[in-house]
Amino acid sequence: MTLKSSLTTEIISQAQSYDGIRAGIVPLKDVLKGYSYQVAPDDPGSQGQLDDGMIVDWPKEARTVLILGLNHPEKDPRLDWLERGDTWGNRRLREISELLKQWFRKEYGLDAQPLPYHVAKGGLFLKDAAVLSGIGIIGRNNLLLHPEWGARIRLRSILLQGDFQATKVLEGFSPCETCEGFCQKACPMNAFPQEKYRRPICRKQIIANVENKVPDGEIGENGKRNLVIKYCRACELSCPVGA
Ligand code: B12
């Protein structure tokens, strides 16, 4: 099936009509050839805290990925807190994905499949997909940097039925080249020895966050505030891009 390239513009504009959303489109086959698939094909250690359902089989006709990025500004830290099995930002991304799926069916009579967060549950490596679709670049903090929001962005993907023209890869945006590396210096665990991100070191910090839940959530059934996990964001929030 060949679809008109003008549909890419329509799909992106529909996705970006939601507040705080940026979107990109990339062929699924390109994402599956990305760096992360080459080094970690099965996403080791990504068991995950999130309650996403598992997608066992991707639809056969799904050949395109629509990537969504939701701004997580510092002034709204709750978006990043994990409460009752999900973060508030991810709940918003799930909701928007579902609305886009309905819109896609109504508008074009085609199927869309929102994917889970974790690769082990049928999701994709989201930073690779976001770079390839032109939403941003990978910074020295090992995170996706968006020109306007820096690393303060969270990702989600939707598989689309059929082929669509990809959005362009971002060019001329390389803020880390002239930066003194605030992100790496800010890491409380020194997870960037020799300026390279080391996952096992970073993971120790994340485990400490998981073990140190705090009662800052909504009022639960027991009349007390729910416990929430506040993940470390030091390498993200110290980045001057989008601060
Ligand atoms: C497992 C996981 C973790 C693990 C391991 C992280 C890791 N990087 O290995 C732990 C729990 C430690 C973790 C920590 C964090 N995570 Co995390 N994590 C994930 C998850 C589920 C998979 C990531 C993964 O395993 N990647 C594979 C490993 C091998 O690759 P990598 O280290 O990420 O590096 C690859 C890319 O940089 C890529 N790359 C580099 N240059 C280029 C260039 C091109 C052209 C391409 C295509 C690719 C590419 O190649 C590298 C591999 O060689 C993703 C969600 C998802 N489904 O993708 C979120 C995700 C990456 N995490 C995210 C965040 C925000 C964090 C934290 C800040 C904690 C927090 N507050 O949520 C920290 C930051 C850590 C860091 N500086 O990288 C966000 C990143 C958003 C962004 N702006 O980039 C994601 C996308 C989830 C989301 N909600 O949107 N995370």
Image (cartoon, grey):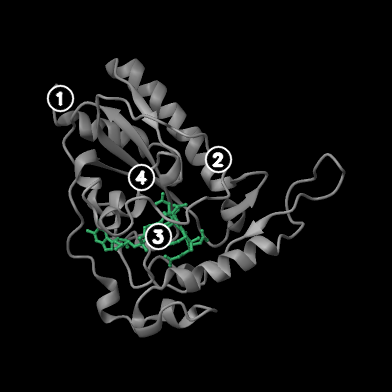
What is the spatial separation of the Cα atoms under label 2 and label 4, in whole angstroms? 18 Å
Q: Are marks 4 and 3 in contact (CB under 8 Å)?
A: no
Q: Which corner quadrant of the image does residue 220 belong to?
A: top right
What is the spatial separation of the Cα atoms under label 3 and label 1, in whole angstroms? 32 Å
Q: Secondary structure at mark 2?
A: helix
Determine whether 115 is above or below 82 in the image. above
For image coordinates 49% across by 36% down, the residue present is 94
Q: Nearer the N terminus, badge 3 or badge 1? A: 1
Q: Nearer the N terminus, badge 4 or badge 1? A: 1
Which residue position is annotated with label 4?
A: 124
For image coordinates 29% across by 29% down, the residue present is 160
Q: Nearer the N terminus, badge 2 or badge 4? A: 2
Which residue position is annotated with label 3?
A: 149
Q: Position of residue 198 (x, y in %)?
A: 41, 73
Answer yes or no: disc 4 within 8 Å of ligand 1: yes
Determine whether 9 is above or below 209 in the image. above
For image coordinates 25% across by 56% down, the residue present is 38
User: Number of callouts in the render?
Assistant: 4
Q: Position of residue 124 (x, y in %)?
A: 35, 45
Which residue position is annotated with label 1?
A: 3
Amino acid type, mark 4: Leu
Q: Residue furthest right?
A: 223
Q: Position of residue 191 (x, y in %)?
A: 46, 77
Amino acid type, mark 1: Leu
Decide if residue 11 is on the left or right side of residue 118. Answer: left
Residue 91, numbered circle: 2
Marks 3 and 1: which is nearer the front? Answer: 1
Quadrant containing the C terminus is: bottom left
Amino acid type, mark 3: Trp
Marks 4 and 3: which is nearer the front? Answer: 4
What is the spatial separation of the Cα atoms under label 2 and label 3, in whole angstroms? 20 Å
